[in-house]
Image: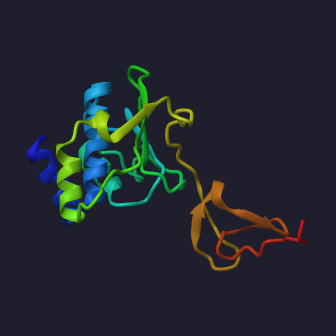
Amino acid sequence: MDKALWEKAVAFHGHECPGLAIGFKACQAAFEKMGIGTSDDEQIVCITENDACGVDAVQALLSCTLGKGNLIYRGTGKQAFSFYNRTDGKKLRVCLKAPKRDDMDRTQWKIHLLNAPVDEIFAFSEPKYELPEKARLFKSLACSVCGENAAEHKMRFHEGEPVCVDCFKTYDRGW
């Protein structure tokens, strides 16, 4: 285990926990199996299937972030991460195997995760999702109800006027 990288992830997340260890080891698996590192822009993309502690390790170690558009959340609730390298086309899905925790407490589980080989704790496969397009810039439009700006691709229209998602009244007749 690379202690300096673990400490970087902990500093970003704010504390040590088993969830952070899962994300840390998923990044380690991507390092080992794909030869990737930190992403200056959008070269490395991660689609995370959870919004748990491990995602912070992905942000800290691979520089995949929502703001850069190279961290995408797909909420399946699984401890799974799909990594893509735009430079060489490599891709890998890393999914935590059903844990065999036996009588381990949280601290013991974290230590086990950090010290176990990645092949022991993860299943590897092709990602279920295609590599998403690069982030695009969109014009902002003012909502005709509240006046707040939102990206044009997120707006709805009512009687020909742009309306933000918060102000839009859904039309649903029970179908």
Q: Residue furthest top?
A: 88
Work out whether 168 lies above or below 66: below
Quadrant (top left/top right/bottom left/bottom right) for the N terminus:
top left
Side of 173 where 63 appears, left or right: left
How many numbered dots are placed on residues in this image?
Answer: 0
142 or 18: nearer the eye?
A: 18
154 or 107: nearer the eye?
A: 107
Quadrant (top left/top right/bottom left/bottom right) for the C terminus:
bottom right
Q: Quadrant of residue 51?
A: bottom left
Question: Residue 10: x and y, percent?
Answer: 18, 58
Residue at 35% in and 45% down: 64
Work out whether 85 lies above or below 46: above
For the question of whether residue 42 can be seen, the reply is no
Residue at 73% in and 73% down: 168
Work out whether 91 lies above or below 169: above
Question: Residue 146: x and y, percent?
Answer: 64, 80
Q: Quadrant of residue 90?
A: top left
Residue at 31% in and 33% down: 119
Residue at 48% in and 52% down: 78
Question: Residue 75: x and y, percent?
Answer: 53, 56
Work out whether 33 lies above or below 59: above
Question: Residue 8: x and y, percent?
Answer: 15, 52
153 or 7: nearer the eye?
A: 7
